[in-house]
Image: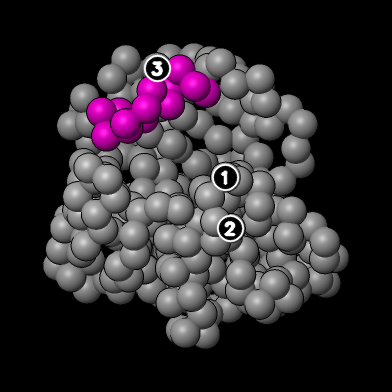
Amino acid sequence: MRVVAVIASYGRKNILDDAVKCIANQVSDVIIVGSSNAVEGTMLGCQYEKEFAESHNLIYVDHKNSPLGQKWQAGLNRARELQPDAVLICGSDDLISDGWVLDYINCKYVSVKKTVLYGTREWYVYNALTDEMITCNYRTREDVIGAGRIISKELLDLLDWQIFPTEGGIGCDLYSYNKMIKHDIYQMTARYDKILLCVKAAWHCLDSWQQLLSAQSLNISWVHEDEKQRILNNVFLNVDFGRYK
């Protein structure tokens, strides 16, 4: 099965390498969507993603950084040209554990439906600056979150491969899900031993950690020290989290 990963990124030099390493050996191709030539107000283009893709023999797509939905859609349009069986959407500060894509493939083969959406409703978030970890899930929504989401070709075909908002003002994940649930989709949740870890550190312009903790739409639980160490040192044993501080 041919699965293509799409990662949109801007200035995530410290973690992009680890995010790609977690994905590269699980998929057929990795597409990096960067903004090397974008000039938006005082925001200059960032060359790192382009150079990173070229040095790692990855596919690179250049697109302005805002609206973000347009940027993601540009990566998905490039993925469509590769004629994959499914597309993996993952953020540049998100790490997925080994076997993530294989779990999707195995589940899809036993499913009688082909319009499959795969991912997780519960994810881990690690604050590298304070060495704290939480788990999150939606209070009021049933969809899997955007990071780590795998979408089958059959479902993408139903949507004509247009799953991201082309204008600003609406969240990419919710927009995508609202389009998908209009069809008879089979939504699969990753097994409990498959982990999605979002890493928060100095590359975030906004204090997204505090935004998470105060979000009324999320259930938040603090992760005990033993579980945190298991995830950091065993699940993602090849990642040096200390360099994110």
Question: Can residue 225 be spotted in the picture?
Answer: yes
Task: Tell me the residue that label 2 is attached to.
Answer: 165
Q: Amino acid at mark 3?
A: Glu
Mark 1–mark 2 Cα distance, whole angstroms, equals 9 Å
Task: Tell me the residue that label 3 is attached to.
Answer: 132
* 111 or 43, nearer to the observer: 43
Say whether disc 1 or disc 3 marks the residue closer to the N-terminus: 3
- Labelled disc at residue 201: none
Mark 3–mark 2 Cα distance, whole angstroms, equals 33 Å
Task: Tell me the residue that label 1 is attached to.
Answer: 169
Q: Which residues are magenta?
A: 200-212
Of tags 1 and 2, the one toward the viewer is: 1
Q: Magenta span has 28?
A: no
Residue 58 x/y as whole percent: 27, 71
Q: Quadrant of the C terminus?
A: top left
10 Å neighbourhood of mark 3: few (<14), some, or many (≥20)? Answer: some
* 175 or 137, nearer to the observer: 175
Q: Magenta span has 206?
A: yes
